[in-house]
Amino acid sequence: MRTYPYILLFLIGFTAFSCNFLDESSPNDLAANGAITDGASAEAALLGIYSAMQNNSYYGFQYMVIGDALADNASTGGYQALSLDQIGAKELTSANIITESMWVAIYRVIANANALIEALPKVSDLEPKEKNHLEGQARALRAMAHFDLLRLFGEHNKLNSAFGVPIVKTVQTINDKPGRASVSAVYDFVLEELNKAAGQLDPTQTQVQYLNTHGVNALLARVYLYKKDLAKAAEFADKVIKSNAYKLLPAAEYASIYTSRRTAESVFELSFDSQNRSGFNGGTYSRDDAIRPELDYMAAQGLGEFFKQSPSDVRAQMLDYDPQNNDATIVPDGRTQKYRGEESKDNPAYIIRYAEVLLIMAEARGGVQGLVFLNQLRKARGLSEIASSNATEFAQALLNERRAEFNFEGQRMFDLARTGSVKRVLGVDDFRGILPIPIREITASGDAIKQNPGYE
Amino acid sequence: MKRLLPVLFGLFFGLSAHQGWAQNITVSGKVNDANTGEPLIGASIQVKGTNQGVVTDLEGAYTLETTPDAILVFSYTGYEGIEVPVAGQKTINQRLNPSNLRLDEVVVVGYGVQKKSQITGAISSVKASEIKDQPVSNLAGSIQGRVSGLNVMSTSGTPGAGLLVSVRGNNAPLYVIDGIPQLSESNSSLSTSFNLQGESVGPGQNLSSIADINPNDIESIEILKDASAAAIYGARAANGVILITTKRGKKGSQEANLNYYTGIQRVARPIKFMDSEQFVALIEEARKNDLAIYQKDNTAFGQDFDPAVLTDPLDNFDLSSGLNTNWLDEVTQSAPISNYELSFRAGNDKTRYFTSFGYFDQTGVVINNFYKRLTYRLNLDQTINDRLTTGVTLNVAYSRNRRSFNDNTYTGTITNALGASPLMPVFEDDGSYSGFENYQASWLSDNPVKSATEIRAFTTGFRVLGSVYGEYKINPNLSFRTSFSTDGNFIYDDQFKSQLTADAEAVGGEAFEGNARTLTWLNENTLNFTKDFSGSSLTVLGGLTFQRTTLDRASALGQGFPPGGLQRVSSAANILRATSEGSSFAILSYLSRVNYDIGSRFLFTASARVDGSSRFAKDNRYGFFPSGAFAWRMSNEDFFKNLKGTFSDFKLRMSYGLTGDQEIGDFQNVTFYGPTRYDGRPGIGLRNLADPTLSWQQNRMLNLGIDFEIKGGRMFGSVEFFKANKDRLLSEDAIPGTTGFQTVTRNSGEVQNTGLEFNLTAAVTKNAPFRWNINLNGTFLKNKIISLSSDGILLNAYSDLEVTHVLQVGQPIGSFWGLKYLGVDPETGDVMHEDTNEDGVVDFDDAQIIGKAMPDFFGGFTNTFMYKNWDLSIFSRFSLGNQVYNLIRATTENLGWSNEGGLSSVYANNTLRVQDRWRKPGDQAAFGRASFVNPNLFINSSHMVEDASFFRVQNVNLGYTFGRVGKLKGLRVYAEAQNLLILTKYSGFDPEVSSNGGSIDRTAGIDYGAYPSARTFLLGANLKF
């Protein structure tokens, strides 16, 4: 029995040793609680918001093309990808995994912004100006994300509709289940936040890979246009134009918008690099010999025919319908060449370009006054000027111009829904201009989120 | 640690007390078998009440010194022991009677051993002799079908692939190899499942933590099935525990074994595809059908449809080329398999060892795959003195695996080959690979032979599993054991896609290299107290264990390689991605078990373990896992005496207890910022949303069992009933996307497994020269979801596939989701599906539960025949009620639908089954009308769900044993067939498929063209010398 003391000692020894034994910490991550403490970490968290926007489901790819495929600009490929097929057939269901991921990816941007906005008051080592600039970007990106959700999943074209999207402006816990806000509430929130951000941003910061003052003004112009507050839309578009920070490239240099980076036409351009690739090239071009199933989105036959009506348009060169270049499986569709660069795959997302600001101005001013801005763009793209026309013709000219300018930049379906043209142009019911809420969200929120009319 | 060492030194070296003996005499003699008179080698003769003893030599002889009044205890495994008083005799020859050894067999339990007769829990034991010489790379493969309650599925035929092991319906049991708990995760960073953008879409092939163990090194495998048996492993035991014990040296014996087998493998059940003529006929029929419909009513064809695509000749799609490639033949082969093993096993009073060398070499039945493994082992035990024993266990394994790229996914070699057109050649006339873009069948993502050859994906593993132990007898009743173990697993992945491949053509070749290092250290300390009282005995175990595991991983991806065969990432023009990350966890455990045996009639077991895990937050990191069991050996009761002639043993068992599960990965309870980058600058972004209250998953299990033995072992078996409720499930729960995340890891939901198992072994005839033994085991299993955080959770087996599975209360886990197929309309040839919501449109909104992956009943059946020197064993397995969602059929039986690839191209070849299709009104056909433009099928439909019940003749082994030949102690030669016959209605390669590896039971049972299983024929020899 003389060994018992040894055993006792042994147990005591181990117990002492084991006090901290179970404290492990991850070498890869920072615990979120207390991660943002100073200017440097706040700056890093801001970059985190931009990085979240790079998600493949958001500005990393899908958000920028789904609107083309749901409308008449793009057709779909993929190997038995039912979700892609649905998009191509314009018969989206609530079980679509592409839109399901998109919803979450956009709210991820909002979650990152909320975390930064909530932590900022505790950051003490920043000048007020720097702090405001950080907060302004976070607010503006959060507002833009809400607006992007609204025009995708909400009845953005019905100002009295109850079917907006959930507004999330606080850090969420796993038990939070916000329901949908009304469309006007979302517009109010987005505009209030963008206006606030416009006042917070440092006007000397003008890099276009970050959301700067001009970018926020351009966004304000866009949102007011969607809200049909044309005076305000014109006011903010005018601010961007008057800033003289941007210009249209000559027709001969048009293609450089897509081959160069951050040209004078870009107001807000989300940048990528070879370490941080976007999905555009892989999804729309992939490789020279690509066959149809290898691509997610192809240029629809109809888009090619649309450009045939205006042969001098320099924008037609971005499309390739030539069977010589394309595999036979792609014909009669073609491929867009806006996102070439098979090796680097660092194609940026053109979130707002100067051309859009001009077209917002044209639409907001309307008729005679607006024609100037429309023709300014047409001239730069190698087209003849349009003479004065009636309102219907002008609206159609604008819609055509937008199609020519922004194909494969995600705007087509929004434009058709915004102008009430879904049924007329696509031949499908108007409710299809708005996407169904992913069924996953309805289930996961315990029915706090209701389905859109037409999809119930 | 510092203050521990002196204590340990003290324990190891300071206490070698020794007692002396006086007035000794020398006793010698021989020990023989009472029936045959053969000398018994290695029989033990012990002086009663001491630790002193000897063993007999090769002639059965012994000599020992003892006191004249001592009592000698003669014992030998498999014989009844006897006590003989010396009474001054100098020669004692003793004959021993063979015993009814079964009940005295020792079974390994957690942290100790127990006699079979004293077991109170549900433990199945498989001995080496039952599983030897099977051509399996993974030891789990050798116990397939041998044990009730255990379902082992080979979900892929890939050489070296992991197996899906489930104990009583719970996947991924804890493996404990010679006392070292294994990690369940696959360590390879090489994902083998990518989509066309190169993003990982599924886990692909599993690498298994037990793949580095040479099956021939194994002495026994014990499966701890109920809570009483498993709870001693606490927080890791919820899915059952599999104890693997390797061979150790034996006192007195000395033997060398050389085992060898070699053989050939072929695809067991190839799928038959259409030849060129049949394929062209199908497509032309499809176009003709479409044209007829178009001419009648063109609304289904869209506005811009040009009917010319239905009549214009298709490019490269006629029989003039004379091509008729059988792609399955092109990518599969007859492949050799062989195994070499040399082992030595010896021992004397002081030193005992087992050492082995093994080499396993398997070529895949798909071209360019192989798995090779070298293993070394040394198990050494040294008796230092009466009190102290020490030893080492060391296993070193080196493996190299050329893996099948995109195994188990729809862009893999097999999957590509399945849809490839017979009108496409493998090579062009100039010897180059044919370009898949230039031929029909747009299903392909590359020429299958090219991708199998030009994508070179290797995984190289190096594993060291070792431990040292010391065991000290403090007094006759109390002993202390401590062990230090290390498990080092080093995995190197390298994958090179040559510039010829479609995957890397645009970037000039692509290489990926990854290194993963997993290090575990483990210290276990146990005290064991045993005391016999009059008629009863008490055993108490107490222990303290520490384990820490760290994982470090780094990888790099480069593109653009110069010519000349440079393939390492450093040679790349662009290094695109580099990762380096780490992870770790620690477990601290206190464990205890009490066994109390009253007169061999009442047996009580109570065990408890407290586990603390770093994976949970401070407040809820400790879990308590108790269990209790009671057994009543009725056969030892007086009232049973009359039955004793029939029932030599009859035992009732009952147990209840709680086990846990912490397999969620490290650091899941904390919300983290992870590193991100934007614009070339480093940032931080939210990585997850955590539930800070995350804690153990737990399994409460009730087990009722009967063990019986008839006529001294002529027939024996057991029947068990169990009911297990697994709750606080660690699950990836859906949360609203408004949080920015889709799922959170939290405790929610409850699943119930109920089942009935039986196991019966009988000697049909045991009279020489002809003996016949049978063993039958079976398990009825019912799995049911009791509650969920939200009902009706839809899941995808692959992240880019549509919903394939659902979790619904009242239904089993892994239920398939899709439309209900109603057959073919004999008038139109349209396939029909149920319109459950009656909205007039058949679409995915009409989906319902259409099947399940889990079997209702499974088991194994073994017949062993012995006639003189011949032996024959036939082992079969069966499974009933399991289904497979055979999604690859949406391609290979798509009835000619080709719109996916554009209307100028043909999509994919079809299987011969499609010949039974609708051709004209009135046809009653298994398949619908061939259609080119619009799909006449629904992918996620019960049409793709097949009954995968099977009866499989798993192993037939015919051997002949030679007696002593010259210096050889024994020689057995045998011929063997593995996977000889599969009786099943399933149309794919193998009914046990689960394309995503199946370890995730929620999305199990998908077939997307998994690697085909092999049929193997072998010749082998076991040589003893």
Image (cartoon, rainbow, N blue to C red):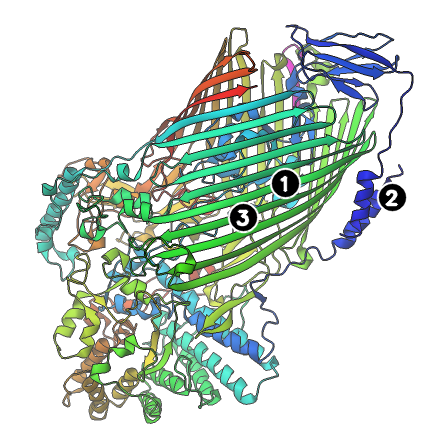
Q: Amino acid under label 3?
A: Phe
- Measuring from the top left, give residue A430's x and y in whole percent: 26, 69
Q: Is residue B773 magenta?
A: no
**Left or right: where does residue B304 sit relative to residue B399?**
left
- The secondary element bearing badge 2 is classed as helix
Disc 3 crowd rating (10 Å Cα; few below 14, some 14-19, many 20+) is many
Whether pointer 1 and pointer 3 mark residues with C-beta atoms closer than 8 Å, the reply is: no
- Residue at (74% x, 25% y) in the render: B602
Give the amino acid at mark 2.
Pro
Q: Which residue is mark 1?
A: B466
Q: Earlier in the sequence, mark 1 or mark 3?
A: 1
The CA distance from mark 1 to mark 3 is 14 Å
Q: Which residue is mark 3?
A: B490
When asked about the image quadrant of residue B650, the answer is: top right
Instruction: Say whether mark 3 and mark 2 are on the same chain.
Output: no
Q: Which residue is mark 2?
A: A5
The residues colored magenta run: B644-653
Q: Residue at x 67, y 54 (%)?
A: B621
For the residues bearing labels 1 and 2, Cβ distance under 8 angstroms: no
Chain letter for mark 3: B
Labels 1 and 2 within one chain? no
Residue at left 50%, top 72%?
Answer: B682
Left or right of B856: which side holds B730? right
Whole-percent x, y for residue B243 in the image: 61, 35
* Foreground pick, B409 / B437: B437
Residue B496 vertical placement versus B1010 (above, below): below
Look at the image and tell me whether residue A168 can be seen.
Answer: no
The Cα atoms of the two marked residues, 1 and 2, are separated by 30 Å
